[in-house]
Amino acid sequence: MSGLGVMCLAGAAPMGLSSTAMAQSVPAVPQPPMPRLSRTHEVVSLNAVQTTRPRVALTFDDGPHPQNTPWLLDILAQYNAKATFYVIGRNAQRYPEILRRIVAEGHEIGNHTLSHPVLARLGDGNVLREIDRTQQIVWDAVGAVPVTMRPPYGSFSHRQMNMLFNQRNLSTVVWSVDPQDWRRPGVSVVADRMVRGARPGAVILAHDIHGPTIRAVPQALQGILARGLEPVTMSDLLAWPHWGPRGLRYVSASSRQHRG
């Protein structure tokens, strides 16, 4: 990691109401053209944050998933925990309402490329196309631009990290705690690995596309909280202003009137 700073587009995202997967979230106003990120820091890449504050970043890759992500959001709300969702652009385009719920409930969205390729095998132009398209999809859905990118499989060279930072002012975030939940080692094993790796500044990797991972989250959160650690978003862990748009509200399914 090469320093801390402030992102220009980060704004306060008001908390919404937790509800079911059928809930609907509503953008307040149509979105103008997507802005470019401005460089206000020198964080090219990181796998953890040097801090004495008792905070960790929970991060979930590969969603949004139509059932698992709303289920996970319900759990996070129960524990008042915040997370960063590194979304695949094609999934985000398919489920924009879930993206809006993520943001309305105070979480952060990061860029995990459009189609989940091995970026280290791509030329710079194709890398930027994968990332730019996902930036646009997220902007169109929630009116905010991701400020960090996670490369699929963690496969991204230092040269590419510098290229992305120089060309798009995006920081690359990998992780310091990997429970290898994609191997499906068991709910208790995943939870224990997340807890054992949790320490101030840790970046914890998980995947919200796997049902057993979601089942592991309550146990993991209980262990993390018992250690006196607060689960926060990446921007909060970095002491950047809270990420998210203004004016996004969340409307629960139960509050809508049925008209026959």
Image: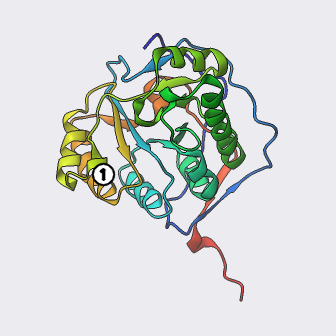
- Residue 78, image x, y percentages: 37, 55
Name the one closer to the observer, 60 or 150: 150
Q: Quadrant of the N terminus?
A: top left
Answer yes or no: is residue 38 visible: yes
Does residue 236 appear left or right of residue 140 in this picture?
Answer: left
Q: Residue at x 57, y 47 (%)?
A: 103
State the residue in front, 90 or 200.
90
33 relative to 176, above or below: below
Task: Examine the image and state in which quarter residue 200 appears.
Answer: top left
Locate residue 111: give its quadrant.
top right
Residue 85 position, x and y percent, is 48, 43
The answer to whether 199 appears left or right of 94 in the picture is left
Q: Is residue 87 left or right of residue 126?
A: left
How crowded pointer 1 is (Cα within 10 Å; few <14, some 14-19, many 20+) is rated as many
What residue appears at the point 61 percent right and 23 percent down from the top-left corner?
124
26 relative to 132, above or below: below
Q: Quadrant of residue 260?
A: bottom right
Q: Is residue 197 above or below residue 91?
A: above
Q: What amino acid is found at the position of numbered circle 1 in the picture?
A: Val
- Residue 21 vs residue 187: left or right? right
Give the residue drawn at x 28%, y 53%. Answer: 218
Q: Is residue 221 visible?
A: no
Q: Secondary structure at mark 1?
A: helix
- The residue to which callout 1 is attached is 217
* Count of number-bearing discs: 1
Rendered location of residue 164, percent (x, y): 59, 21
Point out residue 150 in the picture as x, y percentages from the top left corner.
Answer: 48, 32
